[in-house]
Image (cartoon, grey):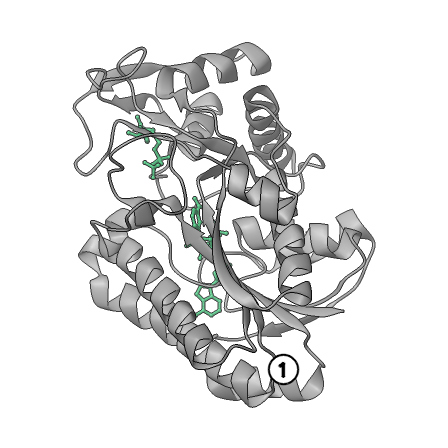
Amino acid sequence: MKILVTGGTGYIGSHTCVELLDAGYEIVVIDNFSNSQPDVLDKIKMITRKDFKFYKGDVCDKEILQMIFKENKIDAVVHFAGFKAVGESVIKPLMYYRNNIDSTLSLLEVMNEYNCKKIVFSSSATVYGKPDKLPIKENFSLKTTNPYGATKLMIEDILRDLYISDNDWSIAILRYFNPIGAHASGLIGENPNDIPNNLMPYIVKVATKELECLNIFGDDYDTLDGTGVRDYIHVVDLSKGHIKAIEKVIKDKGVDAYNLGTGRGYSVLELVNTFMKVNNVKINYKIVGRRPGDIDACYADPSYAKEKLGWSASLGIEQMCKDAYNFIKKIEEM
Ligand code: NAD
Ligand code: UDP
């Protein structure tokens, strides 16, 4: 089986490439390095001791996609390529709509042309907006508050419409909660160049003293300790979910969405304290005002993914904190 992975050198894509290769799939990767580095390709090969084909290019570009499908017999696609920063999407909405929607349309058109109709798509828990109750189930109403989330919702609609028009498609929409952590080898992980927006990359940069102090956005939420609660999931567990989703789309036709989360929420302070404890390192933090648009708590009911895909997360918060720090220390040693 040959799987095309778009955005395969990115954070989640690289971990999924490792899991796909380990599971015995052949892969072909396309990425334009707009948010990743070429050396990730060697790291994936080092971890797995397997080789694969790589195309440097833009998924919006139908010509390169046609070349890939002509040169390789692709059985299914995992589509990660896209921009993902909520704040940036508010400032540059056109860039987000253009890249995320255009790349998906080009990809689906070329897949259709080559009669490859199996796809796993990276959606996000952001499509639930501010949920009325918790834990979040897949049948909750969908709404978003920013252009990034809107692109995810639009793509979900496009995929559902595509299936209605042609029942030969097999489509798995994966709604990720909060992926953190890194591969156990410490060779791949998340290391944004800019000042991080997300909590874990920020904590890590405070731990390494690259940044001075973590700002905790609000301690007056309706949660256990007043800080925001999220469903953090180890990126390796999340990547394994893609293997199960690929098995599903290879086997069954249809379109369906699955929550990939642990089902357990942790507050900002719980995450910070766990990070300090397991890594024996101090994180300076101060409480500041709420970040606009943030919700108090968000965690998944992951039972549908367990029932339909046979997948559930197994790595805990301590492992997530250890692996995130191990990855960054390895980079510093190099
Ligand atoms: P990432 O930025 O690390 O990876 C995305 C990869 O896609 C990058 O390597 C980038 O260079 C590439 N890319 C972007 N646009 C491209 C294009 N037009 N052509 C070719 N390559 C392109 O992000 P990630 O965290 O690995 O996220 C992967 C997917 O999962 C994204 O679609 C993202 O929206 C979604 N997602 C991520 C999170 C998260 O917290 N990380 C949560 C929910 C959903
Ligand atoms: N957060 C924080 N300081 C930061 C970044 C995030 O206190 O520098 C909080 C944020 O308010 C939320 C949680 O950490 O409660 C997770 O935020 P993140 O941006 O990682 O994920 P998202 O909000 O998109 O779920």
Q: Is residue 173 above or below residue 3?
A: above
Q: Position of residue 224 (x, y in %)?
A: 32, 11
Type of amino acid at the residue the image marks with label 1 = Ile
Q: Can you say whether 64 is above or below 5 in the image?
A: below
Q: Residue at x 63, y 65 (%)?
A: 252
Q: How many marks?
A: 1
Report x, y in % for residue 230: 38, 29
Q: Would residue 80 be visible to someone looking at this image? A: no
State left or right for residue 28 relative to residue 282.
Answer: right
- Residue at horizontal 65%, vertical 39%? 183
Drawn side of residue 123 relative to residue 332, left or right? left
Q: Which residue is mark 1?
A: 68
Between 242 and 211, the one nearer to me in the picture: 242
Across and down, in percent, residue 282 comes to 46, 12
Task: Determine whether the residue tagged by mark 1 lies in a helix, strand or loop.
Answer: helix
Residue 17 in view (yes/no): yes
Instruction: Work out which quarter of the rendered image holds the C terminus and state it.
Output: top right
Q: Does the beta carbon at disc 1 come under 8 Å from ligand 1?
A: no
Left or right of residue 146, residue 209 in this image: right
Quarter assignment of residue 314: top right
> Depth check: 278 or 224 in front?
224
Label 1 Cα crowd, 10 Å radius (few <14 / some 14-19 / many 20+): many
Q: Residue at x 53, y 49 (%)?
A: 11
| x and y percentages locating residue 76 in the rendered image | 64, 70
Nearer to me, 195 or 67: 67
Q: Quadrant of residue 26?
A: bottom right
Quarter that holds the N terminus: bottom right
The image quadrant that residue 292 belongs to is top left
Residue 221 left/right relative to 157: left
Residue positioned 46% across, 34% down in the render: 301
